[in-house]
């Protein structure tokens, strides 16, 4: 229901933007101020740093963006818009919290539109999604010709896994500003996530042509080529990005691509390079986590457990509670013994209960992921009563939250438990909701086969086998699934 609701609001914005375009086919430069989100600051230096940060954000130079947002906030400590964007983009949970709280304290001094921006981005971090999404749509309706605002909205929607809505917003911006490079970048990702690689590649070709000397177009093209299974071509694009700017960070893309190619030793070497030059503790621990998953791909249980335990310890030392909990959750996903896995999940939940600086949205969404794994592991040992209670917990969370991630975790858990109970027909609608998740896709394939939906089973099998994401979920499901398909094809 939320998906339809969000589409309606974005459709309303699109109609308003269309009406604006028809009634004002050409707007003079003198009217630009009324077509853009205002930026309220008393300092010329702060405004200059802020504008530089926004240009860097559009080029996806996030460390530089953060540096200049900090400079803007230092030049004007009352610069609420710089603070809320710093909170949105920073990987440091302490900085997120401090900047968010300060921006909310200053909101009453800002313009009404900037107050909407704060309500949107702060509300989302605080798990207040209903007013957050409403504020975002109010802004998009009010400023249909602000391409930077559209880019920010598209970027946020992509992070929320709302790819269709992101494409809607970004395409609207591109209709008005066809050469807006930042929107081309994000819309390409949106189309790739929706499986429309023809449109994704077309957008990327335009993006590279507009900014051939920037590293991010090649870095992004590499990622989308990897998603499409064009792995050698992906490596070529990443290396072009490195040649343009060795400090941009594209060695991480090389590592991710080696990982899905099965070249795990080479992947770890690249991850090691990426870890050395990580711009923050959060980036460093995240890259350590990705490196640890290479041991899972090699099915080296001892090394995987050691590496993931190291990640959990490093995250704890750095005060990164969400990443610490994630490391324990991944150990639970990889652990063959369900009872031991439940102990890892309990450790993950204990981390979330500690006094870590974690945004409410990150805490709630990680809790949902933990419960999703817990339900599946309980179902494995046929503790259906406990599994059903866990699904009920997720259902309650999904009923009170507008987080797309929580919604998907609920449907994935419900589908997994129903499959374990042999209720394949009932499981299918739940699993279809989360059909981008590898385990849900595998279970959906199983349910389709068991209910005689042969063509649907073949379609989801092809999609799952072609999944080339450098994630633990892909590592645990896809390589084994590809082998099973080959085995089934060879049977008489």
Image (spheres, grey):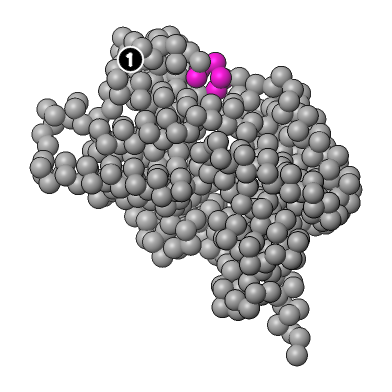
Decide: is 465 above or below 29.
below
Q: Nearer the viewer, residue 48 or 157?
A: 157
Place of residue 491 in the rendered image (x, y in percent of width and height, measured from the top left): 76, 86
Inspect this view and state whether residue 216 appears.
no
Place of residue 459 in the rendered image (x, y in percent of width and height, measured from the top left): 56, 72
Residue 323, by quadrant, is top right
**Residue lying farthest to the front in this orientation:** 385
Place of residue 4 in the rendered image (x, y in percent of width and height, measured from the top left): 41, 50
**Residue lying farthest to the bottom in this orientation:** 492
Q: Nearer the viewer, residue 138 or 219?
A: 138
> Is the residue marked by circle 1 packed among few (<14), some (14-19), or many (20+) residues within 10 Å?
many
What's the residue at 33%, 39% (across, down)?
Answer: 150
Q: Nearer the viewer, residue 308 or 271?
A: 308
- Mark 1 lies on residue: 110
Place of residue 127 in the rendered image (x, y in percent of width and height, measured from the top left): 53, 30
Horizontal relation, residue 244 to residue 316: left or right: left
**Image: magenta residue range:** 95-100
What's the residue at 58%, 41% (across, down)?
Answer: 398
Horizontal relation, residue 118 to residue 250: left or right: left
């Amino acid at each position: 229901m939320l998906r339809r609701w969000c589409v309606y609001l974005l459709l309303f914005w699109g109609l308003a933007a269309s009406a604006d375009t028809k009634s004002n086919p050409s707007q003079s430069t003198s009217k630009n101020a009324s077509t853009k989100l205002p930026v309220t600051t008393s300092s010329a230096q702060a405004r200059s740093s802020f504008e530089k940060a926004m240009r860097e954000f559009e080029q996806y130079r996030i460390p530089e963006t953060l540096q200049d947002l900090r400079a803007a906030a230092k030049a004007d400590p009352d610069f609420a818009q710089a603070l809320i964007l710093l909170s949105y983009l920073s990987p440091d949970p302490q900085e997120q919290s401090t900047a968010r709280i300060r921006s909310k304290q200053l909101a009453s001094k800002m313009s009404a539109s900037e107050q909407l921006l704060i309500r949107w981005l702060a509300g989302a971090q605080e798990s207040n999604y209903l007013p957050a999404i409403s504020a975002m749509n109010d802004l998009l309706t009010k400023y249909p010709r602000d391409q930077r605002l559209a880019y920010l909205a598209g970027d946020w929607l992509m992070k929320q896994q709302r790819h269709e809505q992101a494409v809607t917003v970004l395409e609207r911006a591109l209709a008005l500003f066809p050469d807006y490079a930042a929107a081309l970048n994000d819309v390409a990702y949106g189309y790739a996530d929706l499986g429309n690689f023809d449109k994704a590649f077309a957008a990327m070709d335009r993006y590279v042509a507009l900014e051939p000397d920037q590293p991010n177009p090649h870095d992004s093209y590499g990622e989308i080529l990897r998603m499409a299974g064009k792995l050698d071509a992906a490596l070529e694009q990443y290396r072009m990005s490195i040649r343009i700017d060795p400090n941009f960070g594209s060695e991480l893309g090389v590592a991710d691509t080696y990982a899905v190619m099965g070249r795990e030793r080479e992947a770890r070497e690249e991850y090691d390079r990426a870890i050395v030059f990580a711009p923050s503790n959060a980036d460093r621990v995240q890259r350590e986590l990705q490196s640890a998953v290479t041991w899972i791909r090699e099915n080296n249980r001892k090394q995987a457990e050691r590496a993931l335990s190291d990640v959990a310890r490093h995250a704890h030392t750095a005060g990164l509670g969400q990443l610490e909990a994630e490391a324990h959750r991944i150990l639970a996903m990889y652990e063959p013994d369900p009872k031991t896995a439940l102990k890892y999940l309990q450790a993950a939940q204990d981390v979330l209960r500690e006094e870590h600086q974690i945004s409410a949205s990150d805490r709630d969404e990680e809790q949902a992921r933990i419960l999703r794994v817990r339900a599946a592991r309980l179902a494995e040992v046929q503790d259906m009563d406990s599994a059903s209670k866990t699904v009920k917990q997720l259902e309650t969370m999904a009923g009170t939250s507008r987080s797309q991630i929580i919604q998907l975790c609920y449907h994935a858990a419900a589908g997994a438990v129903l499959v374990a109970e042999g209720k394949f027909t009932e499981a299918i609608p739940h699993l279809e909701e989360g059909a981008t998740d590898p385990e849900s896709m595998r279970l959906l394939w199983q349910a389709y086969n068991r209910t005689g939906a042969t063509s649907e089973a073949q379609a989801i099998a092809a999609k799952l086998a072609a999944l080339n994401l450098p994630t633990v979920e892909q590592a645990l499901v896809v390589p084994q699934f590809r082998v099973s398909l080959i085995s089934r094809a060879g049977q008489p």
